Image (spheres, coloured by chain):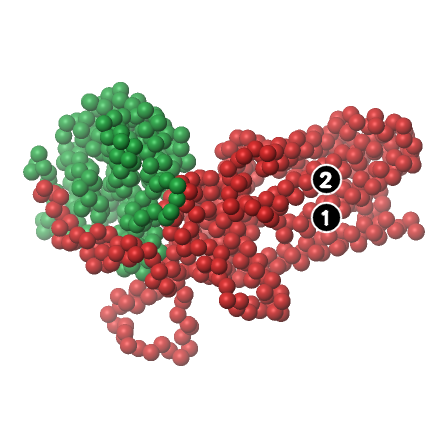
Chain colours: A red, B green
Amino acid sequence: MQYIPNILFFLLLTAGVGYFTKNIRTVIRNIKLGIPVAINDHKKERYGNVARIALGQSKLLKRPISGALHAIVYLGFIIINIEVLEIIIDGLLGTHRIFAFLGGFYDFLIGTFEILALLVLVSVVLFWTRRNVLKIKRFLSPEMKGWPKQDGNIILYFEVVLMGLFLIMNSSDYALQQMGAAHYTQAGSYPVSSLFAGVFDAMSQSSLIIIERSAWWLHITGILIFLNYLYFSKHLHILLAFPNVYFGAVTPKGQFKNNQAVTTEVKMMMDPSADPFAAPAPDAPPPAKFGASDVMDLSQVQLLNAYTCTECGRCTSECPANQTGKKLSPRKIMMDTRDRLQEVSKNMDANAGVFVPDGKELLKDYISTEELWACTTCNACVEACPVSIDPLSIIMDMRQYLVMEQSAAPTELNGTMTNIENNGAPWPFNQMDRLNWAKE
Amino acid sequence: MSDLLKVPTMADFMAQGKQPEVLFWVGCAGSFDDRAKKITKAFVKLLNNAGVAFAVLGTEESCTGDPAKRAGNEFLFQMQAATNIEVLNAYEVQKIVTACPHCFNTINNEYPQLGGNYEVMHHTQFLKTLLNDGRLKVEGGKFKGKKITFHDPCYLGRANGEYEAPRDLLRKLEVELVEMKRCKTNGLCCGAGGAQMFKEPEPGSKDINVERTQEAVDTGASIVATGCPFCNTMMTDGVKHEEKEENVQVMDVAEMIANASEL
């Protein structure tokens, strides 16, 4: 009988971690639907980026208010997780505060967690105010209506509840320690929760134990629910930001990807010994599709980008097209990519792991050509992203599909391209007049 | 004045069995656009004055393919690149300077994968090396003490991380350099990039160049300096839209240096 809590805890933990693992495997499967990219270069620079941009939050801090608030919540998240380790060991072994033997250092740890928990609570309230009370433009974009807005708030509620339970757990524990209750050894310092331990003064030891145990169980259950919420939420960034920054571009931002399929075609065209009328060999692979019209045409890094996006909207608020009222929003490009990828994922789940064409595509069903053609390729969105997401590369791949597969460029651009093709300049000037300026 | 311009071509050099110090890649705007041609000439005056043995490709130059690539026509881009690289490699070109950040970016970053490897410099970077080597004198002249703001071209700044070369040159002109709210890594685009120069903007509440020009005008600067022929066009149009032609001029950094020395 005495092992029932241990067994319950084990089952809870297995269920929580198990379901999460299943969903993460789905994320990995979905990312692998993209075109593989071999990235094994610039290792030192990439780890440097992870340290500076992901761990060090260098880009977030460019916006001091939200950056500082985020840094607090992030620090709290990382550090308070040490406490979760203790909770898991206690839960499995039936011990209480197993790390208490650390003595003074344990006091320091618990004290730090408490102060961080309080700071996180304050930050989360401010975050909520920013999202719901203050009229901050980047939270009011059309793509933030409905679920994305709700998602943002749910995450904040989770954090309030978790931090609240953590502090209730500690303060009731503290009160029990003061009473000298059996099992509750004097350990830890409680700079925050001791402040309101007074409310427990009138309570009996047994009701206090009920409060402490309930808070303890609800806290760890809440953490496991939150962990499993990640897959359904933009909050997945807390895990994916790190690999995403690692795989982020290390080349100059102006260097757009070379389309190798096109290089092959151009080489063939320029090869005087190539037979233009030759039938393709029977075992030749089907001709490559130029550009992207759906998620499967994007690279694995671009799909990882989509899962990593936490919809903060720094990209959109820096975008010159968006700022001047155009439909384009780089954040929406990322959200659409993820939404479509999830749609494909559900399709695969329903069809024994095979995607059955559903007559839909990322292009047009999610992202309109009007959005794609509004981009000035200025790289402001790429620069702004705190976790090295590249919305511009998706826009470019989709433009390539529109132009090379569908010949669907805006009319004026068709004229420009014809000029370049015929006379080597975007305007209709004769190439032979190129040096006239020197004689004028 | 213009009859004093010395503009030798690569073919001229080759005929003499010589190699120029640097190839000046003029670009389409620099060759054909009336406003940009003035920048080209100003830069050539500076090169002539500094005694730089440069050459142009002249009629052998063709669009780098930047607008085609950004418009999604990778095929046309790579055809242009292949042709240009063939010409450049045939002349054994080592070093290229250009007054257009789009040409600079494309040749510098996108040609190497297609077989074109050169040392490429933006003209402000090149002018700065001339200055450092004592070959070019930059002094305030009529710009001394004037309030000037620099508009970062996206393809020079964010795309390639060069923010200081043009500003260093402007400081040498002893101007009062004022920054716009959005500058350097946060610089706002003029609206021309990504082939937008060649099409009408999508429907919106405002044109990007107007938004940017208002920001530039708000600094109180009498000159908006830039380093890109397309930014120049967009900002000039913006100044006209704001009816500020009387008070605000848009100039390339090279033009300002040439003007200051009364070249």
Residue at screen point 59% across, 34% down: A133
Q: Quadrant of the C terminus of chain A?
A: top left
Q: Secondary structure at mark 1?
A: helix
Q: Nearer the viewer, residue B214 or B195?
A: B214
Which residue in the structure is indicated by mark 2? A162
Q: Position of residue B242 (x, y in %)?
A: 29, 32
Q: Left or right: where does residue A323 sit relative to residue B49?
A: right
Q: Position of residue B58 (x, y in %)?
A: 15, 49
Q: Left or right: where does residue A393 sit relative to residue A347?
A: left
Residue at screen point 64% across, 49% down: A230
Q: Position of residue B138 (x, y in %)?
A: 22, 27
Q: Is residue A37 visible?
A: no
Q: Is residue B14 above or below residue A280?
A: above
Q: Nearer the viewer, residue A223 or A416?
A: A416
Q: Is residue A141 visible?
A: yes
Q: Left or right: where does residue A215 sit relative to residue A20?
A: right
Q: Is residue A226 above or below residue A287?
A: above
Q: CA–CA distance between discs 1 and 2?
A: 11 Å
Q: Secondary structure at mark 2?
A: helix
Residue at screen point 55% across, 69% down: A356
Label 2 crowd (10 A; few <14 / some 14-19 / many >=20): many
Q: Position of residue A295 (x, y in %)?
A: 50, 59
Among the two numbered marks 1 and 2 on one chain, the one whose residue lies closer to the N terminus: 2
Which residue in the structure is indicated by mark 1? A224
The type of residue carrying mark 1 is: Leu
Q: Quadrant of residue A77?
A: top right
The type of residue carrying mark 2 is: Leu
Chain containing the residue with disc 2? A
From this viewpoint, which residue is outermost toward the top? B145
